[in-house]
Amino acid sequence: MGSFTGPRKPMKERIRNFTPAWHTVNMGTGAISILFHIFPYGSKTQAMQIIALSFLILNFALFIIITTCAVTRYLWFRSLWSAMIQHPVQSLYLGSFPMGFATILTASVGILYEHFGFGGPKFLYALWVLWWLDVSVALIICFGQLHIMFTRHSHSIRAMTTVWLLPVVTLIVASSTGGVIAQSLQVLNPSDALRTLAACFVLVVTGLAIALMMLTIYLHRLIVYGLPEGITIFSAFLPLGPMGQGGYSILVMGQLFRELQPLQGNEVLLTDPTTAQIINVICFCAAFVLWSLATGWLILAVLALSETLLTTRIPFKITFWGMVFPNGVYAVLTIQLSIILNSPFFRVWGAIYSVFTLLIWLYATARTVPSVWDGEIFQAPCLEDQNLGGRMLRHAESK
């Protein structure tokens, strides 16, 4: 664990070891700001919204700092970009970048624009333009990273973890953010909202389809080879990400499609008033199925983590932050279901799980701050592999 009194790692060495996994801090902090905004109890109060706003401001500041450090790393050490891309695990965390930014956009719509009335239509359209930029980055990372996994990496089923999901979930997160923006946009311009909705459907269907394929492989890996080892056991919670965020996205889009009726045009199917109701019900059913799947994966993750903690002491690393966001979006979906169903069970469970997610965030923060101070947390596995390869090459040449 880091210390405020121990020797401190030089700044240049910290930047050199600054990995893409740091963007998971944005994802986790963004999830907390959204949870405070929609918390089932007291979310309408000014105090709760001010707390949500505080987390949004903190997340924006963290995004600027983390992005600046990441850009500086590849400007100072240009060869590290290639080393990072070639790494079969660290490169997958590139997906955390657009997802972290998407949480800022989502919270900005709900907290700044909707609750505090900040910026007006121009601000909303600025967020909409930024969302399209985020979608572009998400598409490049998703399909570009999958191509690199096919052609540049060496993977095996035994070594697989749910980190494989990270590039794919970028599409699902972008779709949910677009749905939230479109809900506000439909008051100003239903046509723009409908275009956004169509893009969101494509994104969420594509992302969920690939994610479910990967989760099938992961279940096979668990049955055949057992649990992941060490710090990678926390990746057992990552399936909550695509399930929770995908369910939330589909739920929002179903409601929005109903609100956009009646549509104008020559297509009988889409202009029929009953179509919107049917689509909304189908979306609700799909979201409920995804919530159920997420709950099943949650049970398996808790059992797996308990089994590991009984026999192993797990060190804290920056990748632990990847656990916050999936739990957060599972809580968001639960709360959203409680609103639609007016269900005390979902309302209470959503509140409990929101508090649990906040506790994870507080624990991660408490462990990160002293480690950042002394620099212990700045470790890049791609550099360790590079150094090991160099030592092996020099050893072979000496013979």
Image (cartoon, grey):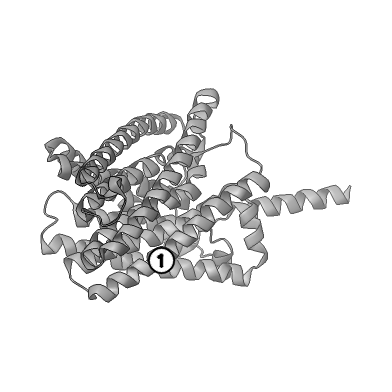
Q: Residue at the location (12% across, 41% down)?
A: 342
Q: Residue at the location (13% across, 63% down)?
A: 47
Q: Taking 348 as reference, is 103 left or right? A: right
- As helix, strand or loop, the secondary structure at mark 1 comes to helix
Q: Residue at the location (12% across, 64% down)?
A: 46
Question: Where 16 falls versus 222 (above or below)?
Answer: below
Picture coordinates of residue 212 (x, y %)?
45, 36
Q: How many tags in the picture?
A: 1
On the question of residue 359 being in view, the answer is no
The furthest residue to the front: 266
Amino acid under disc 1: Phe
The furthest residue to the right: 399
Picture coordinates of residue 164 (x, y %)?
52, 43
Q: Which residue is mark 1?
A: 63
Q: Nearer the viewer, residue 399 or 212?
A: 212
Q: Nearer the viewer, residue 24 or 258?
A: 258
On the question of residue 164 being in view, the answer is yes
Q: 10 Å neighbourhood of mark 1: few (<14), some, or many (≥20)?
A: many
- Residue 371, located in which quarter of the rendered image? bottom left
Question: Where 101 falls versus 309 (above or below)?
Answer: below
Picture coordinates of residue 124 (x, y %)?
28, 70
Q: Taking 278 as reference, is 103 left or right? A: right
Q: Nearer the viewer, residue 373 or 351?
A: 351
The furthest residue to the top: 224
Picture coordinates of residue 391 (x, y %)?
75, 52
Question: Where 28 falls versus 244 (above or below)?
Answer: below
Q: Nearer the viewer, residue 158 or 169?
A: 169
Q: Residue at the location (13% across, 38% down)?
A: 343
